[in-house]
Image: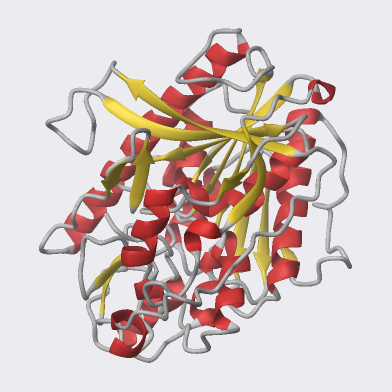
Amino acid sequence: MSVVTKNPDLAMGAQATGLSSVSKSPTSAVTKAAGTVARTVGGTVAGKVAGRVAGLAVLVLAVSMPASSAGAEADAASPIGVSLPAPGGPYPVGTVAMRLVDRSRPDPLMAAKPYRELMISLWYPAAGGGPLAPHMAPLAAADWDRRSAPPLGIAKGAVAWAATRTHARVGAPVDPRAGRLPVVLFSSGDGGPRTLGTTLVEDLASRGYLVVTVDHTYEADQVEFPGRRLVRALPLPAKLTPKVIAKLLADHARARLADMRYVLDQVTALAHGRPIGGELPKGMLGAPDASRVGALGQSLGGSVAAQLTRDDTRVDAAVNLDGSYVGPVATRGVARPFLQLAAETHTRAGEPSWKSFWRASTGWKRELRFKGAAHGSFTDLQPLLPQIAAKLPEVPLADYVGTIDPSRSVAAQRAYVGAFFDLHLRGKPTRLFEGSDTRFPEVSLIP
């Protein structure tokens, strides 16, 4: 599979140009010119891009990228450098990537494989130094550059993706001052690598959380495993009918749900002092607090976070970053605390799965709309694309991350997501969800 950004606005743009949209309930009325194409991709569909909108069972066949942006290669001598915003919590951040193998089940997406293999990263409050972790592993960054960036209008070689660093130190010891760490599991949008949530993930870790990010192998655009082994997304089916697309996303949602439950099993083992995977940072054994667990996801990851919260009693609260709902949770809702963040044009009125989910959910719940935000605003594209568009003005910035000020968007997302988990995993009171806040005028509380 091959899509990272799922922008409802672009889906409607493709529909307006006469291309095949299979959405029964489009989430936006914004139309774009045919020259602005629908998605980020991996390398499975050359010349055409299949877009999954907001994690819903929607795919759009998009036109080829204009040769000036997708076909051309940039001057390799002067790639654009980009950076991620520094986390705002009191702790430095550490991280470690790990390979996990679930031998209790065959791979749900690759039938010939008798086990499920995943890459995860642990992000946590750290003490001590170590090298800064890259945003993307080297082979993954190179593959992103070749296959995933050009459909965004970013030519191969235009950006120094492999040079981008996070603010986390590789393998740094866990800071004992943080005490037992509440856990948050993170899942990206359909087709997206786990790295695309780093902006929010690092901030939560700096606030004293253990955040576990998960790559869903054979669905994510690219996953780099130890030993310099790269696994790409499976090719899209040749014929993308509505029925095929609905089944595809349902299959992905089921695979992700099993992945997340397995990862939660591993975190629980860590909490009880049992090692998992490879080498762990000093102090990690026993550090997670498995009695306080949250789920966080963007797009399809948000739907899976909801389903996980409904199905697994270990999960106490969850956040959905602009994802529509796939599977049983769409009509059954959740009974535990839930926060839903929405792009400006994504509404319950226009999205049946949001309406049915909201009506069925019986626990603490809030929905926040971000004025000027688009679907990609809730990914690392929010801080990164504006830096690129400043030097490559042909990049269709508003299509992917809207018109909201990037730094204000990031600050608001961090504030609300952090306050939500502090409230429901730590019992820390907040007034942030009681009404509008003058610090974040772009954010409105939807009754």
The image quarter in which residue 65 lies: bottom left
Residue 217 shows up from this direction: yes
**Near-viewer residue (310 or 272):** 272
Q: Position of residue 61 (x, y in %)?
A: 24, 73
- Image quarter where the N terminus lies is bottom left
Q: Where is residue 174, by image quadrant?
A: top right
Q: Residue at x 54, y 8 (%)?
A: 274
Residue 5 image position (x, y, % from top left): 43, 64
Most distant residue in the top direction = 273
Q: Residue at point 51% right, 40% down?
A: 305
Which part of the image, by quadrant, shows the C terminus?
A: bottom right
Which of 228/263 is in front?
Answer: 228
Residue 419 x %, y %: 78, 45
| Image: 42 above or below 149 | above
Q: Is residue 327 visible?
A: no
| 57 or 411: nearer the viewer | 411
Q: Position of residue 220 (x, y in %)?
A: 35, 49
Nearest the eye: 12 or 70 = 70
In this picture, residue 183 sits left or right of residue 206: left
Instruction: Establish if 72 lies above or below 240.
Output: below
Q: In this figure, which colouring scheme has been used for the structure?
A: secondary structure
Q: Residue at x 45, y 56 (%)?
A: 324
Residue at image location 43% in from the left, 50% down from the top: 138
